[in-house]
Amino acid sequence: MPSIVILDFGSQYTFLIARALRELQIPADIVPATAPSEKILALAPRGLVFSGGPDSVGRRGAPKPDPALFQSGLPILGICYGMQLLASHTGGKVAPAPRREYGSAEVEISTPCPIFKGLPSRFKAWMSHGDEVAGLSNGFKAVAKTAAVPLAAMSDQTKSWYGVQFHPEVAHTEFGSKILENFARGVCKISERWTMASVMESQIAAVRARVGRGSVVCALSGGVDSAVAAALIQRAIGERLFCIFVDTGLLREGDRDRVETLLGRSLGLKIKTVEAGALFLRRLRGVADPERKRKIIGKTFIEFFEKEAKRLRGVAFLAQGTLYPDVIESVSVHGPSASIKSHHNVGGLPKAMKLKLVEPLRALFKDEVRTLGREMGIPSEILDAHPFPGPGLAIRVLGPVTPEKIAIVRRADAIFREVLESSGWSKKVWQAFAALLPVRSVGVMGDGRTYENAVVLRAVDARDGMTADWSRLPHEVLQAAAARIISEVRGVNRVAYDVTSKPPATIEWE
């Protein structure tokens, strides 16, 4: 399907460009900024978006696109760094801004421009830049300004090249979606509609093309992502899908029963459960570093899947429920963005693998996966479950993992979720859990001194997991959870509540 192709120059906002376009039902793909033009043009783009980025265009080694893209005749929208790149490429001047802008600014449109069609002459926009375009050349004209930046937007309508210094993709920019829609629908003439039905059809076709007549083992965790991935692959290849559920000993209460009964019954999946708790705990013994934990867990998972695959004829592929947030946080796949942590199914995978990966959800966000699941008729009981990380409770025990610590955090987590369920708050928050801190504190229980563990509760409101805000749970709900945990979980005498958003924190503590 023809689409808008977004070149990622390292902005943490790049995924928001794709999200904003998809919400307008405009097909969008993200590729590395330095990808060869043949790879980009093979996607049949109707237009290109150059994302923002942390670099300066004049610095030696700053990322640049394949020069052939400028000769492709495609419309281009440059955002922030992308605008500066367009200006620099055409002989304009980019320099450190005399007055850097971070936050909201009022943009004034000075000249009519196709991407501003239907907008008022003034609107609020989100700025985040240290450099600016200081001079234009070769066809570009200034079309908007702010109090601090004379060149807040530029246009070369002959080439259909446009640049904006602000970020239309963020919610803080008024009419940002309209600007992107004007570019995609008006300038690039995209009439196709990106819907979950079209995603389902294209991914089923992609799975069939990749797998051919082979078979697939699917890493089934019981979470939303792997369940939707398994259901989609089953539609593509039917009986040639074999689901493996590895009981790592790091699961929450009830997870195993939920996988073996609910997923097997509702989705009609063939599921084999593998007991592996002793091995995972043994390999994690004494390991405190969270990155090492993730890599150990990822490597051990792969060993089990490859072992099981050998017992099945024609299996050469491993399916995972990898999502776009997993990718962007684990490795700089698309551009020079920072790696935040290694997800066990991305950065935590071993370099040498015998199985080839099948990841039909890799370009989707969590809420899009849920929408896809509903399109496929998957029950809400599966789709509305709180996210649970693949490494399990190992990354909710801060520091070295032991069976005793896993037991503590497992029970505390279950109590917290039970309280949320009974109070009606479980469906109001996006994700909630308990984590065991690597500290002990003095307390008084039964008129005696205690020196026990501290547990922190975390509940967040989010849409896709890329950003999140802490949930404003009622005090009586937190009090009920804390009282039960201290009363029922031996070894805990203190409960805290995390009130940090993402960013600056991540959702999980490790």
Image (cartoon, helix red, strand yellow):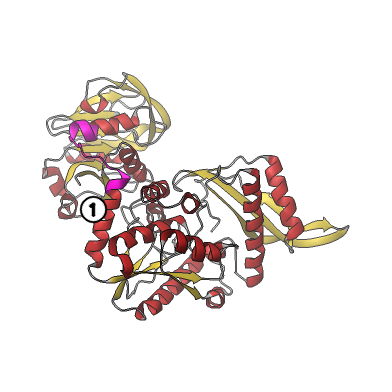
Q: Position of residue 127 (x, y in %)?
A: 38, 33
- Pick the front one: 427 or 269: 269
* Nearer-the-camera pick, 160 or 215: 215
User: Whole-percent x and y of residue 95?
Assistant: 29, 37
- At label 1, which amino acid type do we have? Thr
Residue 446 appearing in the image: yes
338 left or right of 2? Answer: right
Residue at (52% x, 71% y) in the render = 247
Which is nearer the eye, 226 or 475? 226
Q: Which residue is mark 1?
A: 34
Q: Going by the image, does 306 lie left or right of 249?
A: left
Residue ranking furthest to the bottom? 311
Q: Does residue 301 sit above or below 254 in this rendering?
A: below
Callout 1 crowding tier (Cα within 10 Å): few <14, some 14–19, many ≥20? some
Magenta-drawn segment:
183-198
Q: Indicate left or right for 108 with 429 as reference.
A: left
Disc 1 is placed on an element classified as loop
> At 78% across and 58% down in the image, what residue appears?
442
**Residue 191 part of the magenta segment:** yes
Residue at figure coordinates x 41%, y 73% from the top left: 302
Q: Is residue 372 magenta?
A: no
Displayed quadrant of residue 107: top left
Residue 347, given in percent of the width and then of the height, sits at: 40, 63
Question: Residue 136 in the image: x percent, y percent?
Answer: 20, 31
Number of numbered discs visible in the structure rendering: 1
Residue 7 visible somewhere in the drawing: no
User: Residue at 31% across / 79% down in the picture?
Assistant: 313
Residue reaching furthest to the right: 447
